[in-house]
Amino acid sequence: MSVEMTRDHFAALYDRHAPGLFGFCARRVGPDVAEDVVATTFLTAYEQRHRYDTARGGALPWLYGIATNLLRRHRREEVRAYRLLARTGIDPLTGDAADGHAQRSDERTDARARARRIAGALAALPARQRDVLLLYAVGELEYGEIAEALDIPLGSVQSALHRARTKLRAALTQSEYMTRETR
């Protein structure tokens, strides 16, 4: 039996999930755009609350599905940002540079180089694989929640995540091998 979500339920839903959604969106499109995406996610969810069946469990996959659909509109910017980070070492979403006071630490320098390699690999992934990987790794959703969020079969989630991990691992391994060879 479906029970319509009340304003109080919706307010609690916002309080519980907005920070996580914001973090997920900010990592993909930057904090300024993320604020808009999260606001639009909750606006859309509120407008479509009559479609949500509260008996089916948590609303988190539903909200991440809406957010992911909205993020697709920003896909070009996301890929461009990952490519810029991979190429320059400057994260256009946070403004952090690979140079500066943090350079004193070899560990931080290695972490930045690794972030550049990861950004390049993420930029090269097909959209679905990137969506699945980021919903899993950043959004911390379970496979079933990702399937629900993206409205795809569970098997598609598993294969997309496997392919994304394989490509990411290969890109990192190749890059680390090349780095060692140039030292």
Image (cartoon, rainbow, N blue to C red):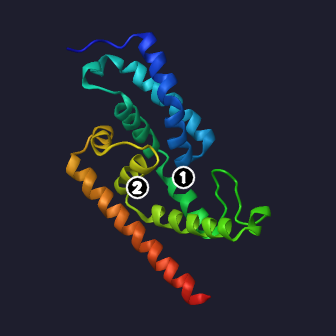
Is 16 situated above or below 37?
Answer: above
Q: Quadrant of the C terminus?
A: bottom right
The three-letter code of the residue at mark 2 reads Arg
Report, in whole angstroms, how far the alpha carbon at label 1 lies from the one at label 2.
14 Å
Q: Mark 1: which secondary structure?
A: helix
Q: Which residue does the image show at 59% across and 88% down from the upper left?
A: 182
Q: Mark 2: which secondary structure?
A: helix
Give me the disc on residue 148: none
Q: Nearer the viewer, residue 31 or 166?
A: 166
Residue 143 percent location from the top left of the image: 29, 45
Q: Quadrant of the N terminus?
A: top left
Q: Which residue does the image show at 54% across and 33% down from the upper left?
A: 19
Left or right of 101 on screen, residue 95: left
Is 10 situated above or below 108?
Answer: above
Sequence-wise, the earlier of marks 1 and 2 is: 1
The residue carrying mark 1 is: 77
